[in-house]
Amino acid sequence: MASRVTTWLSWPLRLPALLAHLRLAVRLLREPRVSALAKTVPFLATLYLISPLDLVPDVVPVLGQLDDLGILLLAFQGFLRLCPARAVTFHREAIAQGRSYSPMAPTGDVIDAEWRRED
């Protein structure tokens, strides 16, 4: 299998994919079916970015910025894993079809239960 060599010149080609991921994250943050716990992950990553404390200080050339980028990528992947798969699929398809944001339609998931109080 041939290996692919990537250079810094290929980054502009990846910009549309990066923007699509950003759009997906914004849509999922607005989605009511995504739990509040999942929605805290991107905000924690943002707090890390603006915090003066870093794993690698930003004064270290290149490495200081790469650790911030790594945290962002890990947070995005973690956020996607915490989101319901149906919500991720729904919004990815909506982005691909060029539809504007709308929350997922109710699926009719109902938990039928009976509650009794015994004194």
Image (tube, grey):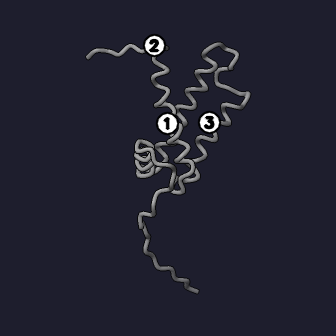
Q: Is residue 5 left or right of residue 101?
A: left
Q: What residue did someone put label 1 on?
A: 21
Q: Position of residue 57 (x, y in %)?
A: 68, 20
Q: Amino acid at mark 3?
A: Ala
What is the CA distance from the residue labelled 3 to the residue labelled 2? 27 Å
Where disc 2 sits, the SS reads loop
Q: Is residue 31 above or below residue 49?
A: below
Q: Position of residue 28 (x, y in %)?
A: 52, 47
Q: Nearer the viewer, mark 3 or mark 2?
A: 2
Q: Position of residue 59 (x, y in %)?
A: 70, 16
Name the residue nearer the viewer: 44 or 26. 26
Q: Is residue 78 above or below residue 86?
A: above
* Residue 45 numbered tag: 3
Q: Which comes sooner in the sequence, label 1 or label 3? A: 1
Q: Amino acid at mark 2?
A: Thr
Where disc 1 sits, the SS reads helix
Disc 3 crowd, CA 10 A, few/some/many (<14, 14-19, 20+): some
What is the CA distance from the residue labelled 1 to the residue labelled 3? 15 Å
- Which image quadrant for residue 52? top right
